[in-house]
Amino acid sequence: MTEPVLSVRNLKVEFASRRGTLRAIDGVSFDIAKGEVLGVVGESGAGKSVTGLAVIGLIDPPGRIAGGEIHLAGLRIDNLPPEEMRRIRGKRIGMIFQDPLTSLNPLYRVGDQIVETIRTHLNLSEAAARRRAIDLLAEVGIPAPEKRIDGYPHEFSGGMRQRVVIALAICAEPELIIADEPTTALDVSVQAQIISLIKRLGRDHGTAVMLVTHDMGVIAETSDRVAVMYAGRVAEIGPVQDVVKNPLHPYAKGLMGAIPTLAGDDKRLVQIPGSMPRLSAIPRGCSFNPRCAFAFDRCRVERPEPLPRGAQSVACHLYDNVPAESAA
Amino acid sequence: MLAFTLRRAVQAIGVMFAVGIIAFSMFRFAGDPVNQIVSIDTSAAEREIVRKSLGLDDPVPVQFARYFADAAQFKFGVSYQFRQPVSALLSERMPATLELAICATVFAMVFGILMGVYSALKRDTVLAKLFQAVSLIGISLPTFLIGILLIYLFAVTLGWLPSFGRGEVVKLGWWTTGLLTLSGLKALIMPSITLGLFQMTLIMRLVRAEMLEVLRTDYIRFARARGLTTRAIHFGHALKNTLIPVITVAGLQFGSVIAFSIITETVFQWPGMGLLFVQAVQNVDIPIMAAYLLMVSLIFVTINLVVDILYTVVDPRLRSTVGRAA
């Protein structure tokens, strides 16, 4: 296999607060290959968005990357000087945020914002950048782009604005796109269009995509692989069909059990008891142990490390030193 | 857009009409004007003649209509104390006040915005904290005290700047300006600072607060994610959004700068409308007081109109809602 576009190793992110240092991300590792879509799921506060922000270098004080390494196509980027990291943002890593209504500056025409971004990263004339901007708007599916390019953000609908945001994220042909809940703020009917657009763009340009969401349906539709995050750690990671059909980690099992199906069976949806611990009160051992039905003594003392299991990798003591056949 | 401007203009005329009623009623309720004009030993018959010649025996609505029609042509009657047309007195004094007000506002805007942006971007530096402390003084010290302190320091102790007056002025048609002579410029410095200091600190605090607010918005975060340079983000994206509320405040403050210039003009014996007004109050010179009231409200109303139009120039969102509503 060739070198992954993005390689995150043992990433730790901390936030200094009045009550001491809170560790939002605690030893997260994953890779994304060229053209691959990695879905990242988890509850609110599991550290999904912070992971995305850490990769693109936008963790603001009091937060900081406290450990680990981030490599973009072999180049270590977590310790770059701010000016060099700025050059990578927008050019080699594009980012899409959750709310398209607030992502664009209301006082500038969308065309000006795209041209500005293009000319920051590529050595193009004003006219050439404008032509490229029109092409980009056409590519993300905005009708009559040569007219709409002179519109202001408030003249676009939510879905159309998210398309503009996507055009902005891909305008310098980045190797990696980080999409942070790109469909959460949109109508359900528009969500599907945006998801298929991101998927198509990733495929056409061979871009690696990190798709952060809490919507398992979106993940199942879009992703090649999925990482399930819990309390700042990756609980399970693997090919999407394996994790959805045969989740290993008790938390992942709970998540998959909580997805309603259209099959019409009258089974009640499974509920995971309790809620995710606050960052200031993460339990000893496995952070999931107070909510886990399978927890045993070791889970309350020792933290499980991710272990490969087939194509999947799972951080759970249930699978430690147990032959594959007898595991649940 | 045109309909919007017209509607605002009609509203402005309505406001001016209301102010006109107040100005007119000053004549009716602040004593008998005839008594102000004639001497104590004038006979009752002569008083009636003066009354008739001034049209004061007409019904009140007629008098008001006449006053308003005259005022619309900038004819405000004759000053009791100077025995000159009020419009001549005002136009003689207005350049001094407007020059002072404009200098004070420019001073306030330039330094207010610069200091505001600096203290928002470099929040934790010593200089930013110093600005904050100084701005508290600027907001809480009364104008006359600042003026007197400046005079004591720069005119009395150091002797660098004149303590009163406008210095030498140059006539340009009916306008007189102090901007073209050295002594005129020197004379302008302290009154401008005195008059503009409050506005400057106000604008500085406003810019700082707005800028900090804007820097937290999603589109600034997205601009950073797009890899724009810090300069483009701060001065292209953040500052423009910051300036929208600043325009309103600065516009409205320009009106109160003119109104507040009464105090500054008194402290510095500045030969402007404010000083004229203070003298008029002391001598119960109602035509001047009424005309001053009308002029100041005309300036206020005009500035409001300009600010409304400027808004739509800066903010495209208003342009379309305004278009739709009209």
Image (cartoon, rainbow, N blue to C red):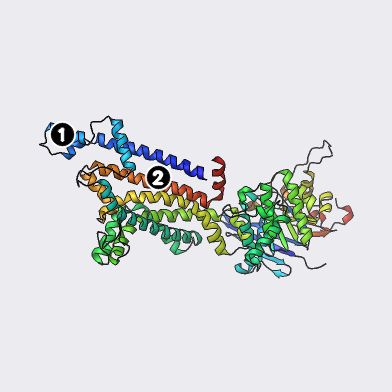
* Quarter of the C terminus of chain B within the rendering: top right
Q: Chain of mark 2?
A: B
Disc 1, SS:
helix
Look at the picture and state if B279 lies above or below A203: above
B305 with respect to B27 (left or right): right
Q: Which residue is mark 2?
A: B301
Q: Kindly report which numbered mark, 2 or 1, lies closer to the viewer in this rendering.
A: 1
Q: Quadrant of residue A166?
A: bottom right
* Mark found first going from the N terminus, 2 or 1: 1
Are the residues under marks 2 and 1 on the same chain?
yes
Of helix, strand and loop, which one carries label 2?
A: helix
In this view, the residue farthest toward the right is: A325
Q: Where in the figure is residue B310, as x and y percent of width and height?
A: 48, 51
Task: Report whether residue A210 is seen.
Answer: yes
Q: Position of residue B192 (x, y in %)?
A: 33, 58
In the rendering, which numbered label is found on residue B2? none
Chain under callout 1 = B
Along the line of sight, which residue is nearer the eye, B217 or B272?
B272
Front residue of A160/B145: it is A160
Determine if residue A231 is in view. Answer: no
User: As rendered, which of A145 and A6 lies closer to the eye?
Assistant: A145
Amino acid at dot 2: Val
| Residue B293 in the figure: left or right of residue A80 | left
User: A46 or B201: nearer the eye?
Assistant: B201
Q: Would you say B156 lies left or right of A67 here? A: left
Callout 1 amino acid? Arg
Quarter-wise, where is residue B159 in the image?
Answer: bottom left
Q: Residue furthest top?
A: B59
Q: Which residue is mark 1?
A: B47
Which residue is located at x 29 percent, y 57 percent? B147
- Residue A180 percent location from the top left of the image: 69, 54
